[in-house]
Amino acid sequence: MNATSKPIVCRLFLCLASAVALPMLFAGEAGVADTTASPFARVRIVGLDEVQWTRGFWADRFDLCRTQMVPQMDALMSGTNYTQFYQNFRIAAGLDKGRYRGAQFNDGDFYKFLEAAAATLAVTNDARVVKKLDEVIDVIARAQRADGYLHTPVLVRQRNGDTNAAPFQDRNNFEMYNLGHLMTAACVHYRVTGRTNFLAVACKAADFLYATFHDAAPEVARSSVCPSHYMGVVELYRVTGNPRYLELARRFFALRDGIKDGGDDNQDRLPFAEQTEAEGHAVRANYLYAGAADLFMETGDTNLWQPLGPIWTNVVTKKMYITGGCGALYDGASPDGAKEQKTITRVHQAYGRNYQLPNTTAYSETCANIGNVLWNWRMFLATGEARFMDVVELALYNSVLSGGSLDGTNFFYTNPLRVTDPLPVELRWSRTRVPFVSSFCCPPNLLRTIAESAGYAYGKSNDAVWVNLYGGSTLATELPGGQKLTLAQETDYPWNGRVRITIKECGGGEFALNLRIPGWAGGASVRINNQPADSSPVSASYFKIRRVWHPGDVVDLDLPMPPRLMAANPLVEEDANQVAVQRGPVVYCLESPDLPHDLRLTDVVIPVNLHLTARYDRRLLGGVVVLEGQAFAQPAGDWTGKLYREFQPANLKPFKVRFIPYSVWANRGPSEMSVWLPLATVEN
Ligand SMILES: [Zn+2]
């Protein structure tokens, strides 16, 4: 599907071959979180078929995703080397024999991969991919039970004669996670291709949930683990207009509020409206918050919106890594220090206490960081506030992209901010990227995020186009007020902050160009047709340029990007007396391949007046800006067998230090790395 062939089957009752009626399909936009008709959204998305990366940072990553990551993921998920994804559906459909293999959430991860493949079609319109997806969707439809239930771990057992296999027997079967991703993937597939085959499967599954959750038993109500289904069912409502799906989303939230024996790990210890802090499993939390924001945009329900403000503030001011990463803990207990011990429950892969942000043992799961993007994107759509896009950008450039290797073949599950050799503690997951991990949720999540990244770049409202992310791109859209608009963006961002936007085509009316001025950007300036703008941009806001535009109008935005030394709140014990380096939206790190051979990472200290120079190195790590300056070596000495010793000042030896972007570390073999580095001790 390309820009000239958007599906226009709006407001018709369609009867599909699968006998599932899809009432009132809306044209909408070919993307995710389509707020085109959302009454409580301030900003609408632009379609994936309306925006395209053209050159530069994101164009390179999209091309890698399209040409390498999607085909390789296809091979992995179609095959049975590591585990089974597609094969589980084939067995459930009766096309093959065998048993179920893999984690209970493999179905959902397979749907994420299908979503990524479908999203690339907005650019490529590749008939082979459309056909391949049709074949896979046909198998998925065959696997689906007549009543709409679709969860291959149970379906395979049933097909193999296990009479004890039934839906919703264990909340950790991840049925809702799987079905939620089915819905989101099907919506993207429909919007991009205009084909209704996948959507019919998703609607049938949602109809099953509608029937099942009508008078749900408490145990069934507790099944909302890793809740992608809030986002999924709201998206299904947006695309079909079927009010039952909106009712279902409301019911999901009402049911979780009725849980009496919940815990923080699944954010169901307290009713949602009473929650004020981010607790528990960080993927589950961020998906819940994203789903609440989605449902708010459709209903205006303040009980959903009100908690999101304090929770967001809690995350951003007390619980988020400088990389935009979420989830400090492998394992923990919550609520910490509860008056009654019996209310304490185990949490895992979870948000920690306020200011508890360990670096070596950081969980910072790629999925949690993507969840941070999904949540903040919806907060932005609801409000139009730049602070939310700042978090989207921070996470994307740092703790999301760090999840994949530069060649797109290896993946991190967790994204630590410090790795030393030896590690001070044994950890469950690999300290290097690997092609496969038994919990394979993150890699296909990364694929769909990159495949859909252009969708975050722009937004639109009645008489305004919003420029959210900077990157070489084109946008051809129609504003809700009817104004047609084509523009081109040229920039080397994030390697420098100079951005040029050229109006290629537009109608004769007035509209606003809203430029995001990031929170880190001091001294930003704007020129319009080479004349300074009437006012100066303010960081952490949108700079609105309202006028009658003409083809050929040029806007130049300059966002100065000096390297900055960053400090953490003194309450973050793990970062005390240390600094990190950031330039623009990119967080940097020091990695051992950039150190002199006789120097260990733990020997490096940073002078308080560190002066760094930015230099683009096109041969290094796919082409990155490195930051170079003079740091000091302060040998740590022999600590063997000692926990404490008398302080021994050491002579500082200068050496040339080179920082690289955090997201590209661990692409040069085994290494040590740290984002935070100690300041040099200086004698009076
Ligand atoms: Zn994950």
Image (cartoon, rainbow, N blue to C red):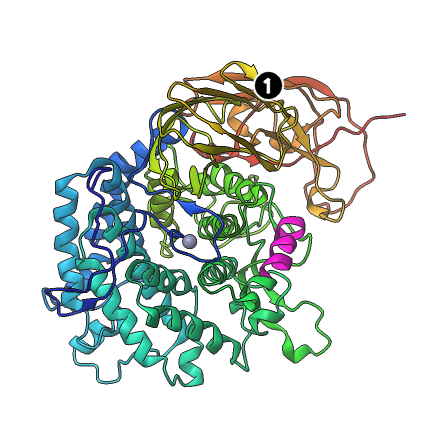
Position of the N terminus by quadrant: top left
Give coordinates of residue 523: x percent, y percent. 65, 24
Relative to 392, 239 lies left or right: left
User: In the figure, 516 relative to 612: above or below?
Assistant: below
Q: Residues within 10 Å of mark 1 (few under 14, many from 20)?
A: some
In the image, residue 626 lies in the stretch drawn in magenta: no
Q: Farthest top residue?
A: 530
Residue 152: % across, % down: 24, 68
In front of the other: 540 or 267: 540
Does the magenta run of residues contain 318? yes
Left or right placement of residue 468 versus residue 201 in this view: right
Against 171, residue 195 (above or below) is above
Check disc 1 and report the residue beneath it: 628
Q: Does any portion of residue 55 appear in the rendered image? A: yes
Rendered location of residue 306, percent (x, y)? 60, 63
Span colored in magenta: 307-319
Within the image, what quadrant is residue 180 found in?
A: bottom left
Residue 160 appears left or right of 683:
left
- Count of numbered tags: 1
Identify the residue shown where x is 57% and y is 74%: 271
Q: Position of residue 555 (x, y in %)?
A: 48, 21
Kindly give the residue lying farthest to the front in the view shown. 508
Q: Amino acid at mark 1?
A: Glu
Residue 106 shows in this picture:
no
Ligand 1 closer than 8 Å to label 1 CB:
no
